Image: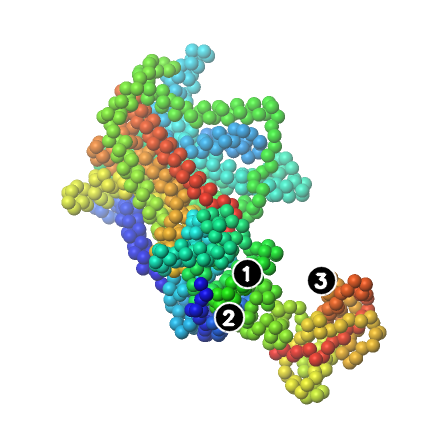
Amino acid sequence: MRGQWGPAAVVAVVGLFLLVFLVLPVVNVIYVAFQDPNTGALTLINFVDFFRTSLFQESSINSLYVAAMAVVVSSCFALPLAYFTSRFNFKGAVLIQTLGIIPLIMPPFVGAVAMLLLLGENGSVNLLLDEWFGFTIPFMEGLNGVILVESIHYFPFILINLSAALNNIDRSMEESAQNLGASGLRLFRRIVFPLAMPGYVAGASLVFLKVFDDIGTPLLLNVNNMLAPQAYLRISSIGIADPMGYVISVILVIFSLLALWTSFLALRNKDYAMLQKGGGGLMKRDLRPWEKAACYGVVVFILLLVLSPHFGLMLLSFGTVWSFSVLPDGYTTAHYVQVVSSSFQFISNTLLYAGLAAAIDVCFGTAIAYVVWRTRLIGRQWLDYIAMGAVAIPGVVLGIGYLRTFYEFNVPLIDKPLASWWVIIVVALAIRRMPYALRACTAALQQISVMLEEAAENLGATKGRTVRRIVVPLMAGGIVAGFVTSFATAAVELSTTIMLVSQESDAPLAFGIYEFMQSAAGRGPGAALGIVAVVIVGITTYVSHRFIQRKETQRTPDVTVVAGA
Amino acid sequence: MESENAAGVVIEGLSLAYDATDVLKGVDLRIEAGELFTFLGPSGSGKSTLLRCVAGFGPTPRGRILIGDHDVTRLPPWRRNVGMVFQSYALWPHMTVYRNVAFGLEERRTPSAEIPKRVKAALDMVGLWELAERRPSQLSGGQQQRVAVARTIVVEPRVLLLDEPLSNLDANLRVQMRREILDLQRKLKLTTIFVTHDQEEANTISDRIAVLDQGILQQVGSPMDLYDTPVNRFVADFLGSANLLDGRVEAAGEGARFVAAGGIVLPLPGERHTPGDGRTAMFRPQDASIAAAGDAGGATAFAGRVSHREFLGNLIRYTVAVDDKVSLLVDDTHQSGRRAFSVGDSVTVNVDTERVRVLTG
């Protein structure tokens, strides 16, 4: 094949990176889980021990319970919102759409402490309830707290997927059912529900996956008897040789794969909802005044709940002392001053790490997308599968894998184990966020008609020049979107970095917040750091959004059609 | 900008298979320098694939392609110097019209002082210099088409390839662009290969046409040759309407005749036919005439009943059922006041036997 040397080199570099930093550590973790800690022989003894230990039995049940309940509670938030926006003419729709980016902007553990102060046993709401009605509600008691915090943060996954599924249902599907005599509940049961189901299942399995793997929230709420936190605690307290951490890792990976498989099965045939193009979305009807009031009531209630962590965090960051009271005793900017003056390295580290990781992600993402969709190299699909496979690897598992695999490896010149060098944090973040960037880059590339490239080659541009002058400029919007998604989520990532930070001067924001939040005195500065994180992520997201919009206006509809023809 | 470097194209034994399907099966063609040559065929005939082989896209085919005297079979697209205009124009949406047109010159390392002059000349030629700073999205379909042409001719390619360039335009614009392309081709004396599935388009602009079906070259010739003397059923049918009758040649020499189903016997004048010559008799609808039943008819008059009638403006096309299985198409010129037959009328069809051809395939 002509012109395949460049792509082949790219495949080699990207493939090696993925092999060393994704496949090898994960395989190592799995291998150790099946290894006798004393003899090194392959055995199932670790798993037998795991299932015999009551703490782990309890942790397994708790993790499953919390993840399942989080799906239920998230559904309670998401279903009404999705339904209102797709069925009714209703101004709240825009408001509800913006809810979609909330989990991007703040990871759940950041808001957890704030939630405790608002909804905990002695939090604002319960103090008021007790004063006025003489009872309290245990919102944040034990597992309840984890469920509530996670649901509030992750319900948009269901909302987004379900809304997309509902909006993809062509109006003519509903109309033809009506034309053939179906209406009301039968129409909903036989047409709308089956068409929307895949979107719901996809969203729900994502929520399950995220909650099952999360370690920051339970740790901060001091709920340790769950699987992911246990994995971290075993490794960090007992040591890297303890097999239980590895066993838990294997179980986490299995459940991740199951959740992803469910989502894959649900979405596999979703194309049928998009078969027809044209008047998208179901018929919307106007609301009667009281209905409108009821809708807004529900929306406002959910919105308040969803924004409560941000609100609480804001109060906490500006409050002096906030304990056993509805609101803080007084307000100050001291926490911000303290954070900026003494803990600035958290912020600069985060910008550096997340920036580098996101840059690696879009470079590799573009390269992989190009190789997969524009060349016929053998094995190119595997690059895609492996890079996307990072989705199934929980952060803790990757962290444990890195510690195990790279602790022995001393980096030349600086004479330090690779596992405790700051660069490994960048690598971990890059691997973890690669799927996001890859998906964005692939989508962008698929929108470019091959003919645009052929036209360039026809006029004398080589493959390399074509990539530089045509492909990359046209992908710019998607590349930026991929960069931002990677950057924003890497900036607030905790579950891998918590294992890999070896000294405070190397620590990123999320780790700093976590450290601060451990002590009562650190909550103010921790919250201030949290707000800084939200602002950073918010600004990057907004700026890139504007950039992408500007790019899009360059191609008005009729050219998009031509490019897609 | 007149092109002295127009080159002929020679295609020798070109075959190509995607996976297990043969897309091109041993195509041999010789296209003269300066000629406007058309690949005509239905979708799936391999005509676009053949064009892409000339441009260098897709897998390397077996056989040889020569442009001028150069074997380009294994050259990458960017080293062939053939200009291609794509079906959807493939204008780059992130560049202005000017930058689109300048692209090829830049890639060829044309001296930068020369580029603006040549871009202007090319855009002037298609009448779009005023729109040079627009983006493709701000142009109409016809304007995009012209930019695509300008972008290609500005590099003075040795061969110009046009891949169904008119299919995205509406009917009126199509006729206009067809003429513009033809004028431009004549003016530049560019060797041009035009791909289309539309026989009218092919007939109106081509010097010669190659008819393709299922990856096989069926016939090459001028539009009129192909229409009047098709070599097989496919060509006869694809270029205009035809009556195609199954049967066989009986007797030889003066008494030769074609015996078809439905009691149709067509005398074959001349001495060129012998039994076993071919199994299909072909004549065009205008090679027969229609008259009321019982009107005087010769040996080649067949009685039948009108089963369909299509009014085409200047003529009326009748389908006349001769029996259960055999129908004939007959054209009758139309003038106001002239009598027309209705569906169900009994009629007599007269065939002009001088025009009947016996086809082998």
Q: Which chain contains the residue that carries disc 1?
A: B
Residue A338 x %, y %: 25, 23
Answer few, some or many: residues within 10 Å of disc 2's Cα (few below 14, many 20 plus, some between 14 and 19). many
Q: Secondary structure at mark 3?
A: loop
Question: Between marks 3 and 1, how big is the CA–CA gap?
Answer: 27 Å
Residue A186 versus residue A312 in the image, above or below: below
> Would you name the residue on which mark 1 appears?
B180
Residue B343 x %, y %: 79, 63
Disc 3 residue type (three-letter): Leu
> Would you name the residue on which mark 2 appears?
B35
User: Quick one: label 3 or label 1, which is nearer the N terminus?
Assistant: 1
| Residue B277 visible in the picture | yes
Q: Nearer the viewer, mark 3 or mark 1?
A: 1
Label 2 close to label 1 by CB (< 8 Å)? no
Disc 2 residue type (three-letter): Glu
Same chain letter for marks 2 and 1: yes
Q: Is residue A416 left or right of residue B341?
A: left
Q: Is residue B197 left or right of residue A264?
A: right
> Residue at 49% of width from left, 68% of height from top?
B189
